[in-house]
Amino acid sequence: MNRLKKSRKDVVLAKDSVTRHQKSEKLFDSEQLLLTKIEAIERSGAEDVRLAMLLNSLAECYRLKGRYALAEPLYHRALKIQEKSLGPTHSDLAVVLNNLALLYKVEAKYAEAEKLFRRAISISEKVLGLKNPGVAAIINNLAVLYKSQGRFELAEKLFRQSLGILQICLGTDHLDLAPILNNLADLYHHHNKYVLAEDVYTQLLDIRRKALGLAHPDVGAILNNLAGLYRKQRKYIQAERYYQNALDIYEKTFGIKHPDVATVLNNVAGVYHDQGRYREAEPLFKRALSVREKVLGKEHLDVAITLEQYAMLLRHTKREHKAAEMETRAENIRSCYVQLK
């Protein structure tokens, strides 16, 4: 799918950007602490399990910050120490194998990632048993890998397997089921399995409402995704209602100038645009663009998305010159983004 087509689809809500910033600060603090501890052990000359787990933790810090070249050798070093100290089938080994597989997935090294995920699952099943939440987590990660490769049947099978394990271990309405349900619903959504997607999203919505309350941001995220599902089917009344519910939650939780608020505004504007309700759509595109520029910066990819969608509205209302200006600006942002990638 090219970037322009992708920009026309509903944007799945990201985590709170403020939370991401706070997490990045904590990661920096963790990195310094881990480096200090690793250096202390290395000075003593020891290469034991403690060092392996610290190396794995430092690698995780680097992976989560996108510093993949620094993370990979640390994972390999941790694995080497673990295999020497604990043997090739210890549960701690499965943890590092899973984390390294996640790194390879991000780097699109799919064959290597699949091999490591499968080894981690094999070890975990032998040590923890077939019905264990830890096993379910790794199976889910392998399913996500298959999903990213477009291997629908394999992904669906493993999502269902992972979900079944957690339902046995935790019950059918536990909050820990939510990530797998969301992955499964998203899989169905993107393969136009609308009935199945709606069923899973609805199940997920019920779980989050019961566990978190009606006005939690995670509830808003599912409302947004359900609305996108309805929009895709041109069920605009339902789509508008769910988007509005999501918007109410985000504005009350984060205030009116927040990236998630801008995302839903952009999506509501898209629903109006789809129906030819241009006068109602335009002020929402303007609001979404203003929030994204102020909060994310004028060169952010989300700004390009709003510019492209707003430009389509302008063309439909015969304002070709202004539309062309927005399209050019969006293209420039995307070009910079590709260069950075």
Image (tube, rainbow, N blue to C red):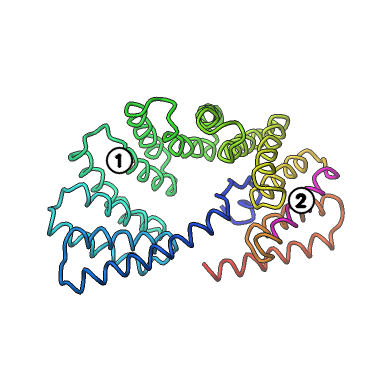
Out of 212 and 286, give the one closest to the viewer.
Answer: 212
Please name the residue shown 72% across and 42% down the image.
268
Please name the residue shown 40% across and 58% down the image.
108
Left or right side of 207 for 114? left
Q: Residue 6 magenta-drawn?
A: no
Secondary element type, mark 1: helix
Res 285 label: 2
Q: Amino acid at mark 1?
A: Gly
Q: Which residues are magenta?
A: 278-293
Q: For mark 1, does the 10 Å Cα neighbourhood hold few (<14), some (14 to 19), or many (20 or more) residues?
A: many
- Give the residue at mark 1: 134
Secondary element type, mark 2: helix
Please name the residue shown 84% across and 59% down the image.
320
Q: Quadrant of residue 55?
A: bottom left
Left or right side of 157 for 76? left
The answer for how far apart the CA atoms under marks 2 and 1 are is 43 Å
Q: Amino acid at mark 2?
A: Phe
